């Protein structure tokens, strides 16, 4: 229920949670499926293994499990949640939204819920949106989720894409706060010139190219990507977004305790670290264990970093991402 309008000092992340399916798919497993090698995948991507959701498990199931953990950590009642945003490129179905299913499963019946389509940037977009909505004074508590089951839309015969992705979810509870902890600033952008499903996307299954037997035979309902172009874009846009966000906040990279870049490829992550001038020990990496979980990568990483004690209260974290659209976003948070 919207509250009476009241200004807030900052929007704090009062709880995070994540969920990774138990089933592990290693590079060695992939060697049995497509013409590739563990060595090639490690060298070109840094990925060693990824998680795959069991049959019958949907994106909402992963999102719900991550959300429950975030709610428990934040010590809130689901009935207190005003707003649920699920960033996903792999919704349970075209509609209803995955967010409404998460809402039902966690019993957050006072919230309004919707999905956000920004591919890998979905979590940062959601964070920025929820920050603004809470700052407006109209809402007090939001749940922002990044959840994906890319294993369902990957072409398991295409070695150029199937090695990259994994399934997983992360969630954050955001609440109005009177302290200085929380989201300092965020910056999001997009460039529709690159809105080309053959560059990065799924061509069939929407209104432009409804599913037919023919396009299913051509695997047009599966992920397509021109990897080298996407790589170059990521290496350019993530440092730009990170540096712009630091400037907006009046900070330098030396003020940041941990950088969490989108976990798409270790080479991209390392290039981003170098270009923004941060030492390697301040850059979070879990792409080796989970691959690219799209909208879920940065929030899974944030949750892991908090739970493992890698970051503590008062630390400054810079998250930065990019994805299909093309989209990008960065956010600086005081933990
Ligand atoms: N195993 C072995 N060989 C392979 C494999 C594989 N899995 N995949 C491609 N190759 C081959 C190619 O066929 C090519 O062979 P050729 O030289 O005989 O033609 C060679 O390896 C080099 O291929 P490239 O595509 O040039 O390899 P590159 O170094 O660019 O790595 C990769 C490919 C890993 C896909 C890289 O381009 C990349 O990571 N791109 C960015 C991906 C990304 O960040 N996606 C974000 C998605 S975000 C979202 O919104 C969903």
Image: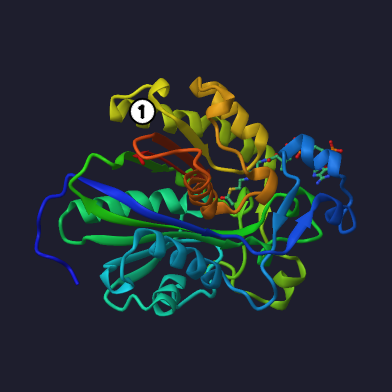
In front: 198, or 260? Answer: 260
Quadrant showing the C terminus: top left
* Residue 127 visible in the shown view: yes
Residue displayed at 52% across by 38% down: 261
- The residue that appears at 76% across and 48% down in the rendered structure is 160
Quick one: quadrant of the N terminus?
A: bottom left
Where in the figure is residue 257, as x and y percent of width and height? 44, 30
Write down which quadrant ligand 1 falls in: top right
Horizontal side of 11 relative to 205 (left or right) equals left
Where 214 sits versus 315, above or below? below
Render colour scheme: rainbow
**How far across and how far down the image is residue 243, in percent?**
41, 26
Front residue of 278 and 328: 278
Q: Is residue 322 left or right of residue 132?
A: right
- Give me the residue at 39% from left, 64% from top: 71
Q: In which quarter of the view is residue 137 placed?
A: bottom left
Q: In this rendering, would 230 be left or right of 163? A: left
Answer with left or right where residue 144 lies relative to residue 138. right
Q: Nearer the viewer, residue 213 or 142?
A: 142
Asked if one can make out residue 206 in the rendered structure from this viewpoint, the answer is no
Q: How many marks?
A: 1
Q: Residues within 10 Å of mark 1 (few under 14, many from 20)?
A: many
Mark 1, ligand 1, within 8 Å: the answer is: no
Residue 255: x, y in percent? 38, 24
Residue 80 placement (x, y as % from top left)? 26, 69
Secondary element at tag 1: helix
Circle 1 sits on which residue?
A: 246
């Amino acid at each position: 229920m919207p509250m009476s309008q009241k200004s807030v000092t900052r929007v704090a992340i009062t709880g995070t949670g994540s969920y990774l399916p138990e089933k592990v798919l290693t590079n060695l497993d992939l060697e049995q499926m497509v013409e590739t090698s563990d060595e090639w995948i490690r060298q070109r991507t840094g990925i060693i293994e990824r998680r795959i959701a069991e049959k019958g498990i949907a994106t909402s199931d992963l999102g719900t499990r991550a959300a429950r953990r975030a709610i428990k950590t934040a010590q809130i009642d689901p009935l207190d949640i005003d707003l649920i945003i699920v960033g996903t490129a792999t919704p349970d179905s075209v509609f209803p939204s995955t967010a409404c299913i998460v809402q039902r499963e966690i019993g957050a019946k006072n919230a309004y819920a919707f999905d956000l389509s920004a591919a890998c940037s979905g979590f940062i977009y959601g964070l920025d949106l929820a920050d603004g909505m809470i700052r407006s004074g109209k809402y007090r508590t939001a749940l922002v989720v990044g959840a994906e089951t890319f294993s369902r839309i990957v072409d398991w015969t295409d070695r150029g894409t199937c090695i990259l992705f994994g399934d997983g979810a992360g969630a954050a509870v955001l609440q109005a706060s009177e302290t200085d902890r929380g989201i300092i600033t965020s910056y999001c952008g997009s460039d529709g010139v690159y809105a080309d499903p053959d560059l990065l996307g799924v061509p069939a299954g929407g209104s432009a190219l409804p599913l037919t037997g023919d396009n299913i035979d051509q695997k047009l309902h599966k992920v397509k990507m021109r990897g080298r172009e996407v790589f170059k874009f990521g290496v350019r846009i993530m440092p730009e977004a990170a540096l712009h966000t630091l400037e907006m906040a009046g900070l330098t990279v030396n003020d940041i305790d941990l950088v969490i870049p989108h976990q798409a490829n270790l080479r991209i992550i390392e290039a981003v670290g170098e270009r923004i001038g941060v030492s390697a020990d301040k850059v979070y990496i879990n792409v080796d264990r989970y691959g690219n979980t799209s909208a879920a990568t940065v929030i899974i990483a944030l949750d892991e970093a908090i739970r493992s004690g890698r970051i503590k209260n008062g630390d400054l974290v810079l998250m930065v991402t990019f994805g299909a659209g093309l989209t990008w976003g960065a956010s600086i948070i005081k933990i």
